[in-house]
Image: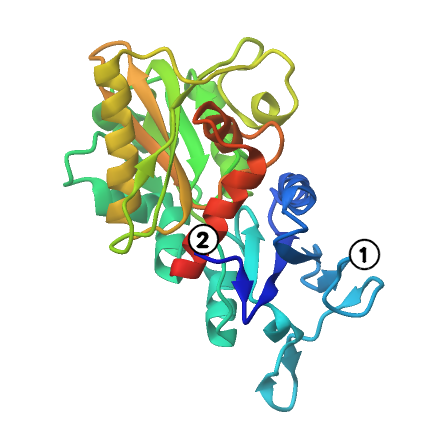
Amino acid sequence: MTFQKNGKKLNIAVVCGGLSSEREVSLKSGQNVYGSLSQEKYNTSFIEITSDGRWLLKQSSKSLLPKGERPLALMDQNKGLAESELKTLDLVFLVLHGKYGEDGRIQSLLDLLQIPYTGSNVLASAIGMDKLKTIALLKNQSIRIPKTIALFNQPSNLADLLKKIQLTLAGFPCVVKPNGSGSSVAVSIVKNKNELMPSIKKAFNEDSTVLIQKYIRGREITCGVWGNSEKTPIEPLPPIEIIVHDEPFFDYQAKYLSQKTEELCPAPLNKRQTKKVQNLAIKVHTLLGCDGLTRSDFILSEKDQQFYFLEINTIPGLTQESLCPKEAKAAGLSFSEFLDKQIKLALLK
């Protein structure tokens, strides 16, 4: 795979920011990617999608377009989709997290413009972002998933909900989470009925569908894989074990703000467990039809020593503190080599 097109360096734009509650993490990831892309191989640009939806080209000494910070033309009010300035690009490196970035919407725009991009296609992105649809797709595929109750409206009868939690989830503790968000935003471990309704309300502030899942006590294990479904081999990265000391679980605080969270890579698993979680991550990636890099999160249950799937991240974080870069480093790759591989996979799509 060459890094040149018609004898010239590839024009690549890193796109980050966005409209979701994860935009700050996305910006950090984007800045890290942009600063690490090889200037010998690529002409690079940095594009921030602002919180009000504008695509802003940031000033860059290697910018493809005129220097300075200005909005990019994407749409023409009279003619619909314009001959966008993005058409000058050979590839978009997507570093968007959450809604309006990881859920297929940006991917559909780039498909219309016929611009290659890193990561999964529209359908796989949309399914991966929707935890309930992911569960529906995986539940008959020999993948263990915590028992789940879905709420589509604020519950009006607490007694009925408590009865359902007892019958379906065997009572408390349970986990309340928004259906369509990442970075553990608005996720709560609920220990008793007094904590239930505030946790549900918090989750509904993030999404219109809320999940209540059985709490699985055990070790938090995450595993990245990469490859294009049905086109290339899907290769696993070394899994990571996450040990949280000052937070109830690996929530937003523990992920990005805590100084006490431990991330052990490779995870201290035996060979059978390592192979099992890697194969599960490959299976989830393949069943959803994902491309490029994904990371799947699991709990290794202390009760039955089985892995339970929690969720997939179709655009994992790429900050200096993020998990997949640590997995790549453990596999012997520099961060720049790690990015090169994702670009290769995107061009192979």
Q: Residue at left 60%, top 11%?
A: 260
x 76%, y 68%: residue: 71
Where does the image place residue 345, in percent across and percent down from the top left? 41, 53
Check disc 1: other Cα within 10 Å, few if <14, some if 14-19, many if 20+.
Answer: few
For image coordinates 66% across by 40% down, the residue present is: 32
Extreme residue in the right direction: 68
User: Is residue 68 placed above or below 41 in the rendered structure?
Assistant: below
Residue at the limit of the structure toward the bottom, as seen here: 78
Q: Position of residue 230 (x, y in %)?
A: 24, 55
**What SS does tag 1 mark?**
loop
Q: Earlier in the sequence, mark 1 or mark 2?
A: 1
- Horizontal side of residue 282 vs 129, given as left or right: left
* 117 left or right of 296 in image: right
Cα distance in 3D space between marks 1 and 2: 25 Å
Q: Residue furthest front?
A: 7
Residue 137 location (% of width, % of height): 23, 47
Q: Residue 299: x and y, percent?
A: 33, 21
The answer to which quarter of the image holds residue 65 is bottom right
Task: Give above or below for 44 relative to 337.
Answer: below
Mark 2 secondary-structure assignment: helix
Q: Is residue 327 visible?
A: yes
* Residue wearing tag 2: 344
Identify the image quadrant of the C terminus.
bottom left
Residue found 39% across the figure and 19% down from its top: 220
The amino acid at mark 2 is Lys
> Left of 229 or right of it: where is 141?
left
The disc label shown at residue 246, or none: none
According to the image, label 1 marks what residue? 61
Colour option used: rainbow
